[in-house]
Amino acid sequence: MSGEEPPDWEPEEPVELPIDGNLDLHTFHPRDVPALLEEYLGACRERGILEVRIVHGKGTGALRRRVHTLLGEMPGVESFRSADAFDGGWGATWVRLLPPQSSQK
């Protein structure tokens, strides 16, 4: 049975993520990242989680650049920076979100 999908697994069903201020993009397809970021960061803002760590990995840096570009365009993002060495280094990004009542940069 190794390599087979569980009998109740549906590939098109949405995956529910814990909204805890940490988003690891390793398991997502790059095409899904824009919508995922928007939805996840919106959910964090709604819950009052205004400091979020996004783990995108080091690799070639392409996903990091894409994430930074997207963050720069999102109205709910106050600022962002690469993580420190102890919390992911340049393989992760810290995002500071605006409070829910504010949507302007």
Image: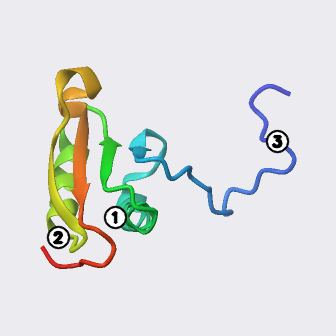
Q: Pointers 3 and 2 in contact (CB under 8 A)?
A: no
Left/right of residue 24 with respect to residue 12 in the rendered view? left
Q: Which residue is mark 2?
A: 73
Depth check: give the residue in front, 29 or 52: 52
Left/right of residue 22 with respect to residue 80 in the rendered view? right
> Residue 77 placed where, x, y %?
21, 64
Q: Amino acid at mark 2?
A: Glu
Q: Secondary structure at mark 3?
A: loop
Q: Upstream in the sequence, badge 3 or badge 2?
A: 3
Instruction: Indicate the quadrant containing the C terminus: top left, top right, bottom left or bottom right.
Output: bottom left
Left/right of residue 35 with respect to residue 88 in the rendered view? right
Q: Amino acid at mark 3?
A: Pro
Specify the quadrant of the image occupied by residue 86: top left
Residue 6's mark? 3
Task: Give the colouring mode of the picture.
Answer: rainbow
Which residue lies at the image location 68% right of the left edge and 63% below the top edge?
13
Q: Amino acid at mark 1?
A: Pro
Depth check: give the residue in front, 11 or 92: 92
Cα gap from disc 3 to disc 2, whole angstroms: 39 Å
Q: Which residue is mark 1?
A: 34
Residue 12's mark? none
Vertical order, 8 against 69 (above or below): above
- Mark toward the viewer: 3 or 2: 2
Which residue lies at the image location 22% right of the left edge and 54% below the top edge?
96
